[in-house]
Image (spheres, rainbow, N blue to C red):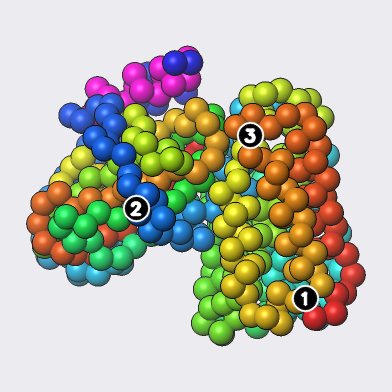
Amino acid sequence: MNRMRRLFFAAVPALFAGGLQAAGTAMTPEQIKGAERIESVTIPMPGEFFAAIGKQTRPNWVKLVRTGTPAATANRAQIALMLGTLVADGYIAVEAQDSQGVKNIGKEIINLAKKLNVSQSVLGRGNSLNDFASNNDWSALREELEATQNEVKLDMEEQKDGSLVTLVSLGAWARGTEIVSGLVDGAYTPESARLLHQPAIIEYLLRQIDVLPAGLQNDALIAGIRANLEKSLAFVQAATPSDQDVKGLRQEMTVIVEEITKGSKES
Amino acid sequence: MTALLRIFAVLLALLSVAPAQEAQSEPPVETDVSARSKALELAGAWSNDGYKIRDGYWSGELEPNRPKFLEVNLFAGNEYWFSGAVVPPARKIAVSLFDGKGKPVAYQVYENGTMAGAGFLPDTSGRYFVKVTLVEGEKSQFCLLYSYK
């Protein structure tokens, strides 16, 4: 038991009658198969990923902040994916404590959301992002970025655009993984590489792509991303991905993010 | 803030949760909205110790003898609190955790009738399962969300 774990479990038990415990019996195969997957809970946000890597290394977040306006496209699937990558960029700007960067990214998120005909309430989120950034309220910004993403998804579902919801999550996860795999690749340690062991997320995203409407599945961008995700799966199977695994994962994620963010794709 | 101060802050926050519940003069609206607000109330206690609350949540109906499971994906090194709540006629809820293969893992317990929490520091990144169980009372709405730092 490492020092952090000892501190964590030593600190809280005094407060509760229950203390430390484990459930009595293991789950049955049926229970594992039947477990629910709720995208807004099952898929971690980039902020969680960045919090974890921040404990392993000292990333130069300022250097990682991406600037510029996303390429123009009328492809709604690509817009949803771009929106996800921007949410991840928002978290990077928060880690960098780059107030103006957060404001710029927030503006781009809202501009993309408008193209998807989202409601007025989402547009209000843009103002909140701006206000929190002006006040350097980084903790609130982390929660507001996720709330903005979830509100966009809610609007998509209400507008019968539910198939695009997964693409927002996919974009955010891919951009977050591109960043973290790059950081691990730059200064490989087994501890930091362990953060990349997330096969269940890739499997979930692949299953979600497989239930998209046929038109979307045949979209060149989506089909390409699916292929990259399948290749990525091999790199995250080991509990401690090797140096080569990390490089492979980074390469696949870079391709995915580049494909999402470059010019218009025919749908 | 020192570790001692942080513990004190968590203690104060948790003490403030229970009385708030007892002080309710009107019966809660028995929907998943009130279950969510109770779960948020509990999660708020961890926020005082630097935990960030996920905006997403899991809600639905919980019946006696029919626990529910949710898949989550966690990162080694992060600290997590899963906060669950039910509304009357449910009286007691429990939250427990399992690894990606469904084996029980050790977690920190918080139980206070209609609210329960599980604190966890994963050694390994990847898939885990959260189980919510209705321990006492009748079928009711539940809500679960989590916080991390």
User: Could you say where residue A74 lies in the image, as x and y percent from the top left?
Assistant: 81, 81
Q: Earlier in the sequence, mark 3 or mark 1?
A: 1
Disc 1 element: loop
Would you identify the image quadrant in which residue B106 lies?
top left
| Whether residue A157 is situated above or below residue A66 in the rendered picture | below
Q: Is residue A13 magenta?
A: yes
Viewer-proximal residue among B147 and B70 = B70
Does A125 sit left or right of A193 as displayed?
left
Is residue B5 shown to the viewer in this render? no
Give me the disc on residue B86. none
| Whether residue A89 is situated above or below residue A220 in the rendered picture | above
Specify start and end residues of the magenta stretch as a single range: A3-16
Q: Earlier in the sequence, mark 2 or mark 1?
A: 2
Viewer-proximal residue among A175 and A140 = A175
- Amino acid carrying mark 3 in the image: Ala
Q: Is residue A74 magenta?
A: no
Reading the image, the residue beneath label 1 is: A219
User: Could you say where residue A2 lies in the image, as x and y percent from the top left?
Assistant: 48, 15
Reading the image, the residue beneath label 2 is: A31
